[in-house]
Amino acid sequence: MSDNAKSIELREVSQVFRGAAFRQAGGELVAVDNASFSLTADPPHITSLVGESGSGKSTIARIILGLQRPTSGVVTYCGKDIYHLSGTEFNQFRKDVQPVFQDPYGIFNPFYRVDRIFWTAIKKFGLANSEPKGRALIEQSLRAVDLRPEDVLGRYPHQLSGGQRQRVMLARVHMLRPSFIIADEPVSMLDAAVRVLFLNVLLEFKEKYGMTTLFITHDLSTAYYVGGEAMVISQGRIVEQGTVDDVMLRPAHPYTQLLLSSVPSPDPEDRWRDRMTVTEQTAGEEIPSRERCLFAERCPKVMEGCWRERPRLVTVSDDHLANCFLYQSVGDEAGRTSDAAIRH
Amino acid sequence: MIQSAPVIDPPATGPVLLDIQDLRVYYRTILGVSRAVDGVNLNVRRGEILGIAGESGCGKSTLTTALLRLTRAPGYIDGGKILFYPNGRAPMDLLQIGETELRAVRWRHLSYIPQGSMNSLNPVMRVVDQFADVMAEHGTANASEARTLAPELLRQVGLGPHVARMFPHELSGGMKQRVIIAMAIALEPDLVIADEPTTALDVNVQRVIIQTLADLRDRMGMSLIVVTHDMAVHAELADRVAVMYAGDMVEIGGVRQIFKDPQHPYTQGLIRSIPHVGGERARLDGIGGNAPSPRNWPSGCRFHPRCPRAMSVCRETVPRLLPLVGRERAGEAPPLVGCHLYPESDGARREQ
């Protein structure tokens, strides 16, 4: 596993949840629907995965981290299926792909001091061979995320603020120097003023240590702020991907366009001048087939073919892809070629 | 799905509807008294949308709870007045009136859209029955009259009449939120207090809720207090914004002044922390340090430990919230600012 070839790749990953809880949804819920994308460590970058609640973005995070085995499809780390790694390779994967979760209150064990999350990592991965060296390592990492070690060490989680706790998790990431960070809604529970500090640390990790981040968020403005690439996910499908500027400033998919027009602007001179109505699905309605565009009933540009066939992710311009028949015709072979290109 | 309609921006110059004077709401804890709301002065005018902004832990929810007289132990009102001037009733101090009078005021004159209101509906009652309950209890209509009114109220928040027959579990989060809004306005109250009305909703549902709230004021002349940490919601909805920090207001001004020309260093930091889709991608600063604890507010100006412009006077003297002369925008009253950067003279602040 040479460093320059490090990558995480999802190939046609789908996740279906079944059970009585989804009776209303027809007995099963397709959380992730045929998702394919890759993250590469070289050059390091930030890819945002943007979606509304229930779109499947957290399930993708869990699948990449190996916490949830997908119903179908393969997740590879450096070209190997993560479920067929050897013991050493698996340890390497565990160290190299680090999570940051949403809830800064739920991830800590309240009975242990904060220090413990650093020491378990040091022991597990053999980062230091003596207590003073380990301590120096922890302090260095805390300073790297703008925390003072004396404010944090020896304390219990409830004695820290939400922003401090999220940064403690980043300090742990800093200590382990992974190639990949999977950050699932890391700032959604933080206040605005603390939020940008966290995002700035992520940006710094990319620049200084070459860490690649999958930044999962429902908030388009934070995704715009961190830059890089963006993927928009809706009802389990990736509907658009490209650079953040392409996706957010020149959105191709009508869903992305709708999403962007709904973001309140933090500028009172720039209030909405038109009104929007939404058609909301209520429970008990007939479950439509998934072999079609799932945005069809809400799409202002819907065409007849959108109801009959599943659109593919096709090229709009350069690296800008959209899953929409506006950019391909129904049954179009060009769509298939581009589909194959994603698969290599 | 997008229809054009002009957006009206009425000025908020009506008579005072709610006048909060030196309100203090504390909590008894085993570690001492927690001064969550500590000396708030604030007023709401008839027909305006007042936004209350602030980070988590600044006391927004404690303040809202106190306005509704819903403070429960270990919380208590340490002092202050909440003067309320409802239509067709004598002015009153909400903190002094008895339970019977309070019952008469609630919902008729003062209603509430709670935080997480998606979970505020009774799961085993149809929507229409929940309307009937509220209107029979607080209004003049009896239950069967109330049932006939429910579809019209739902229409006002953009929901179809069939929703009345549904159970809460059949509705999406945004629809439940709008049912709650419809119930809050059922008796045409003078003032509606909405606590984080858009948090935890998806963006396009959030947009519909914001429009619905704006409509209530534009069409029905209702006054609203919208409490949220999300500054973009204030920018979209509010006429005036009160910025709260550490249990007190640090700046109160017209929405344009707050966003375009903030005066208090905390407000400035807050505005500078908001990313904006399509804006220049410059590094934002945020505000360093941690929010202080209500059990132990910093001395003097409570923001001084995090303030980039703190002076020695800030550590010693509490700045009073006073009008800042010379910073008013055309047609607006001067903003109220509590900061020593603008020295005090004759009951006002002036720039040096």
Image (spheres, coloured by chain):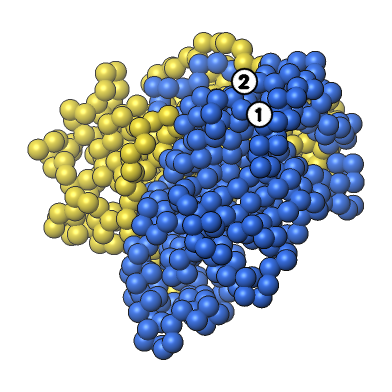
Q: Residue at x 70, y 60 (%)?
A: A81
- Circle on res. A335: none
Chain B: what color? Answer: yellow
Chain A: what color? Answer: blue
Instruction: List the residue tagged with mark 1.
Output: A314
Q: Secondary structure at mark 2?
A: strand
Q: Nearer the viewer, residue A201 or A271?
A: A201
Residue B198 rendering spot, x and y as whole percentages: 58, 38
Residue B195 rendering spot, x and y as whole percentages: 55, 42
Query: Identity of the amino acid at label 2?
Result: Met
Q: Residue at x 65, y 47 (%)?
A: A57
Q: Residue at x 28, y 35 (%)?
A: B262
Query: Identity of the amino acid at label 1?
Result: Val
Instruction: List the residue tagged with mark 2.
Output: A276
- Hey, which quadrant is residue A85 in on the image? bottom right
Question: What chain does badge 2 belong to?
Answer: A
Residue B64 rendering spot, x and y as whole percentages: 51, 45
Q: Nearer the viewer, residue B252 or A112?
A: A112
- Hey, which quadrant is residue A149 in on the image? bottom left
Q: Residue B201: in sight, yes or no? A: no
Distance (Cα) linking label 1 and label 2: 29 Å
Residue A159 rendering spot, x and y as whole percentages: 45, 71
